[in-house]
Image (cartoon, rainbow, N blue to C red):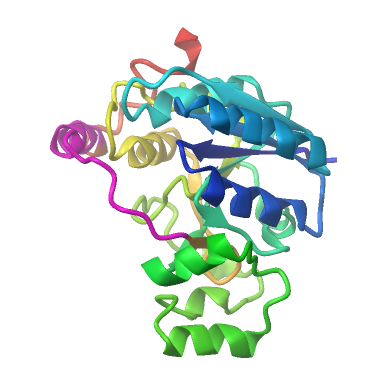
Amino acid sequence: MLLISVIVTTYNWKEALSRCLESLFFQDNLDFEIIIADDGSRADTAEFIAYYAQRSPVPMKHVYHEDDGFRAAKIRNKAVLNCAGDYLIFLDGDCVTLPHFISRHKQMAQQAYFVAGNRILLNQSFTQSIIEESQLFHETPWLTFIKWRLQKKINRLLPLVYLPLNQFRLARPNYWGGAMTCNLAMWKNDFYAVNGFDECFYGWGYEDSDLIIRLIHNGVKRKEGRFALPVFHLWHKPNNRYQQENNYQLFMQRVNDSTFIRAKKGISEK
């Protein structure tokens, strides 16, 4: 039996995290664990997670480090070290899943491939109502999604269309664009082979793209999760992007160097 580890990254937004966790509790396949990668949240988040861990139908762990700026790469590495599963799904704590999220990821898992899902963006006012009304999407009919799109509460409908698994999913094996850790899956042994996330990426931006390009350099191919694996991404203000340009320049150096595979400061340094 394949055990999946879902790594949920969070920082000081427990209201969004509650929507994320509750959507995971409604999965039609419960052969997974949840590892919350907490990038330095306040103490009330720890209390909140402890409460949800008692309610969870699956094992849940809270992995934490102190707040020292945006260090998603570091806390995700630390979370992976605490995983029991052989297959990793990275999910952001401001994303809400549908009930088939785990089962479809499990169906799509294939040796030597990573799977890139996609997302549907919610607008600001709709996000607020989702949080205030504790609303999920596990029983939402198609007509409601169409209404939300017409009302511009969500930015698109196409990700909700399901297409059976077929060869188009393997059509772009070396494409890194659009693969983000808000909805990304891979085998743990492939993650370790490239030394995980590179903690040289400090501050927001490109730590996930860097991981993907190193996986590709190491022979791991892309499998497309579009038209099967959407998540709903709650609106929030943009993260502080003061390091974006530096991170982008570092990433671009690696895109063009096919010999660069292992993170300089990765999971093996823990």
Is there any visible trace of residue 37 in the rendered image? Answer: yes
| x and y percentages locating residue 180 in the rendered image | 42, 49
> Residue at (73%, 74%) from the top-left corner?
139
Q: Does residue 71 appear to the left or right of 64 in the view shown?
A: left
Which corner quadrant holds the N terminus? top right
| x and y percentages locating residue 52 in the rendered image | 72, 39
Task: Please state which of residues 81 and 13 is positioned toward the viewer in this rendering.
Answer: 13
| x and y percentages locating residue 162 in the rendered image | 62, 76
Residue 236 belongs to the span the image colors magenta:
yes
| Extreme-top residue of the structure | 269
> Residue at (28%, 26%) from the top-left corner?
202
> Residue at (77%, 58%) from the top-left corner?
26
The correct choice, above or below, for 172 with respect to 151 in the image is above
**Which residues, given as a range, are shown in magenta?**
234-254
| x and y percentages locating residue 81 in the rendered image | 60, 19
> Residue at (80%, 42%) from the top-left corner?
55
Task: Please state which of residues 268 and 257 is positioned toward the viewer in this rendering.
Answer: 268
How many numbered marks, from 0 up?
Answer: 0
The correct choice, above or below, for 78 with respect to 134 in the image is above
Residue 183 belongs to the span the image colors magenta:
no
Dividing the picture into quarters, in which one does residue 112 lie?
top right
Is there any visible trace of residue 230 in the rendered image? Answer: no
